Structures are given as structure tokens and as C-alpha cells.
Amino acid sequence: MKASKALAWFAIAIGVIYFFVPLIGTFEFSMRMRRGAYSFDAYQSVFSDAQFQSTFGFSMLMALFTIIFGMLLVVPTAYWVRLRLPQMRPVIEFLTLMPLVIPAIVIVFGYLRLYNSSSWIPFTGSIQGTNMLLVLSYITLSLPYMYRSVDTAMRAIDVRTLTEAAEILGAKWPTIMFRCIFPNVMSGVLSGAFITFAIVMGEFTMAALLNRPAFGPYLQLVGANRAYEPSALAIIAFAITWFSMGLLQLVSRFSKMAPSKA
Amino acid sequence: MSFLVLEHIKKSFGQTQVVKDFNMSIEKGEFVSFLGPSGCGKTTVLRMIAGFENPSDGAISINGKNQNKLKTNQRNIGMVFQAYALFPNMNVFDNVAFGLKIAGMNKADIDKRVKEMLKLISLDHLADRYPYQMSGGQQQRVALARALAPKPQVLLLDEPLSALDAKIRVSLREEIRQIQRQLGITTVFVTHDQEEALSISDRIVVMNAGRADQIGAPSEIYNRPATRFVASFVGTLNMIDATVADPAANTVKVGENTVKLKESIGALKGGDKISIALRPEAGSLSESAKGDTSITGTVVLSHFLGSVIRTKIDVGGNLISFDMFNSPDTVQPQPGETVTLRFNASDFLIVRD
């Protein structure tokens, strides 16, 4: 009993060392920009860099659009599958898992072949079109996480009965969707949104190959040309991810406090 | 003309026909229960009235207007679900107000109507509560208020008491009946609980395998079941295998006993097999009891159940269950004892398939 407990602690210690030592090392290195003293100069340099601000802002905007349009696609789909097409559920689950199986580079090459400037739908023919294509590709990438989080939230409420209850009280589809279903799957929507946000902020392949000024390519650029700033950026990227995960925990805790069972 | 009319309703899911030529007319203000086992089609009929399912054939009309082509949200029907189905994101007030807002009522009228409804269900003090802060019984009362608030033409109750504990079920069913009487609303209640159906209905429809086996008042259903299924499903019934003794005298043999029946044996001949039924509470063991016929048998088991003593009596191979009310003077029959049960000829029912 004692030996197994010690073994468990040993395994935890190995895990913690494996995870935290590089992180602490990176953090420590990011503080050494000023000779002979620890400072936040690298962070200051990063934050004052106009390119950081513009790429960060661009990725934030892309993330926002990805979340809005992704949810407008995922919530009605998950709802419809639960309500009217339960037999299609395995197919939809398979489709939403595809982005995890197909590498991002393959997806983006597919997009470029399909939507280049000389195609029927020339998304890449303009900046706005390319941005739109980038959002669509981000939606594809985040689909596995978005769909699952929304579907799990829908499982917690009796979607069919709530829909019927609203319908018999005279409600039409938009009212049912936005007043009865959406607010009750908000925890799932927010969980999906935070994961999507974290994915979009760090994504490199799609943005680089579509040649858009996103945060992912900026991280790569700085990493290749500077010494201390990449470490500071790595810590910032971690902080963004943890912040998203923290918000996710907070949302799920609040949703547990107010059970949404019908 | 009746208020709610169901004519030759049929419903199939794929190859399975779940409702087979269902006919029913319900008067305005009537409380009708659909009673039957799981899978008999009662909920499907209710869902067709609501518009959640379309009949494969037949017509549904309310107040003379055909409903077949109308969508659920155009029918002005109220419904209470087994799972309450209150909107979790809305408090009690907003839940009750939902249908009124959809109907486009102004704020002051909504406020007045919701308060009126909450007073009706005696929950006016809980208007700010959310569904998860309430008990099952309270949630179902709110669901009832929500269904009634837009003044529907018909109220549908889909096993609304099934998820509640026994005590709440009894009090809530009485409350539902009292509110229904007060508002005079035409109500269709689906249940598989015979006690619920018998206690609150004006009429009961006993459903079996997609058909209405019998439609009648609770006492009629209980005392004069039309089919073997109704007889076995509603209440407890002793099914006794008997042989026709004398068709002219309307008598049958049960073991060594000759029993006189009130109901006509019909075209059966002497020696033909016949099934007769007897309620456990019919008859008496008392020698002073009135009765024009009797059965003698041997006590096999006797259980003291508080208000009732339940005795199993072997009569020519038929095990007859007999209930008698307990009183301080009642002598409990003992196993092995020979007893004579006295009946009226009208207590026996001839059971036809």
C-alpha cells in the first residue's frame, strides 16, 4: 500500500518535472534580456511591437468570427440531429472528427485548389475573401471540439420535450431556437468558444499558407529571428490557453450550480 | 356536434400500425382519460391531437374545425408533459408568460394573467423561482399553469403524474380535476394508472393494441368490462373457468358448485366451457349476507393487509382471490378451512374476448 503510494507520487513528480521544468526554464530565459538582472524587457519588447498588436488583434477578430459562425453552424446542426435525424448522429460525429484525422496542411491545400482566384468561388481573389476562407478553415479545425461540447450540453436537457413544449405554446422555429434551446446549451457553447479561441490564437498552417497576418505565423517569425522574445511569446501563448481553460472551468462550474435539466 | 372529434384515426410507423381505426367524440368541458398499457397507442393519439404526429388516415376536428392541416403552434392546445418540460433558463413567471408573449399580449395583460394562473395553482409566492429550485410537484403545477395561461381550447395531459411520488400524485390529480372543473376546459388525460383514470375522469377510453376496447364512465368500465382485456386491465379480477350447467336456468358449474348468473349465457349449450369473472371485493363470507348464489371452497392463503383481509380460496381448481374489509369483529379465515362465499348473480360477469 505504502510502496504503491510512493510510486504514485514518483509518477506525479516525473510528470510535474517534465511539464514545469521547460516552462520555468522558458520563463526564466524570457526574463534575462537585460544583462545581469531579471526583467520584463522581452515582454515589453513584445507588447510594444506593432506587428504583435496587429497580428494579435487580427487573430482575435478571426477567433471571434470563427466562434460566431461556427456556433451558428454547430448549434442548429446538433439540435436538428438530436431532434429529427438521430440516425444521422454517427455520420455527423464521423464528419466532425475528420479535421483531427486529416492534417491541416492537406485541408488548406484542398481549399487553395477549390477556392483559388481562378476557381468558381474565388475566395483567395481578395483579402476579404481570403479572410473569410481563413475563418471557414478555422471552423473546420475547431469542429471536433465545438460539436462535442454543444452536443454534450444538449444531452443534459430534454431537447425534444422542450421543443414540443414551446411549439404547443405557439412558438415558431426562431423563437424555439434562440429563446428555449440556445440559452440552455450556453455552457456547451461557451466551452466550445474558449477551445476555439485557444486553437485559433495559436494556429499556424492555415494562416501561413493563406498568407494572412495572424498570430501563429508571427510567433514563428519572431522565433526564427529573435532571442528572448520567443520565450516571452511562448509564455504569453500559454497564458492565453490557461486563461481560456480557466474560463471553461468557471463556466462548467456555474452550469453545475444551476442544473439545466428539463 | 361534439367538441373534439377523432374519426377513423390510423397511424403507422413504417410497417407497424400503432393506432387502428380509432373513433371518439368528446364533449366540451369533458374530462376523458386514455387508459392502457405501454405501447397501446394512447400517447400516439394524444400526440396526433397536439399535432406532433400526423395521422396516416382519419380526421381530427376541434369545435367543428379540421385540425389535420394545422401545425402544432396553430392549434391553440395546452399540454402538460410527463417530464414537466419547463424552460430551465426562465423563472416561474417567465415560463407561465411564455405562451402569452408568443400570442402578442401586452405587458399589463400578461402580468395580470400570469398572476391569476399562479394564484390558481397556489404558487404565486414562487414567481421568481427557477425550475431547478422547485420540487417535482411544484414544477408540474407550473407546467399546468403555463399550459392553461393562453386559454387553450383543449388541455392534453401526457402522464403528468408519473414522475411524482405517491402522495403528491393523489393531491395533484385532485387539484388538476378541480381546476379543470373550475375552468370547464375539455381535457384529455393519458395514463397507465387505472386508479388515476377511475378517480378523475368523466369517461375512460381503455385502449389495447391501437384500438379503443371500451369507452364509458369509470363505474361502467369497472363494473361492466366489455372485453377480457378491459376486465383484466381495470382492477383486479378473478377469471374463473366454468362449464355451462343449464342454459335455460342460466347456471354454470364451478367445481362442484352450481352458480346462477344474471347475464344471459346466450347460445351456449350444456357442457360448453365459459369464462366468468368476479371482483375480489364482491360477495361475503357472512352467513347472514344476502345473496342468491354461493360458492364453497377451501382456504389456501390468508393475508392480513390492515384495512383488508385477502384470502385465496380454491374452488374446483380455480384460485379465487377474495377481499373483505377488516373490523375488530372480523374473523380471519385460516388455510385449510372450508368456507362458503355468498354472491348476487349480478356479481358474475361473462367474459368475452
Image (cartoon, coloured by chain):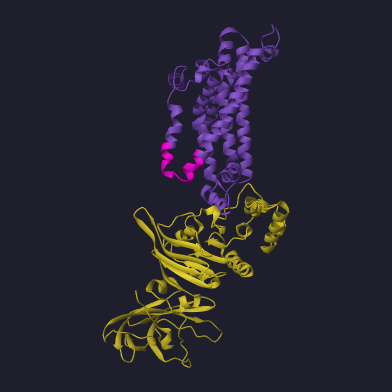
Range covered by the magenta-colored residues: A77-91
Residue furthest to the top? A35
Decide whether residue B58 is among the magenta residues.
no
Provide the major secondary structure of the magenta segment.
helix
Is A164 located above or below residue B330 in the figure?
above
Instruction: Give residue B291's position: percent from left, percent from top.
Output: 44, 91
- Nearest the viewer among B66 and B102 is B66
Instruction: Give residue B232's position: percent from left, percent from top.
Output: 41, 72
- Nearest the viewer among B333 and B316 is B316
Q: Which chain: yellow?
A: B
Q: Residue at x 67, y 9 (%)?
A: A33
- Nearest the viewer among B193 and A86 is A86
Q: Residue at x 56, y 28 (%)?
A: A66
Q: Residue at x 40, y 83 (%)?
A: B348
Instruction: Give residue A82's position: percent from left, percent from top.
Output: 48, 44
Callout count: 0
Residue furthest to the bottom? B288
Instruction: Give residue A202's position: percent from left, percent from top.
Output: 56, 21
Q: Is any atom of residue A205 visible in this view?
A: no
User: Which quadrant would residue B199 be assigned to in this image?
Assistant: bottom right
Chain A display color: purple
Decide whether residue A78 is among the magenta residues.
yes
Is B14 located above or below residue A12 in the figure?
below
Q: Is any atom of residue B315 visible in this view?
A: yes
Q: Residue at x 35, y 76 (%)?
A: B352
Is B265 located above or below residue B34 in the figure?
below
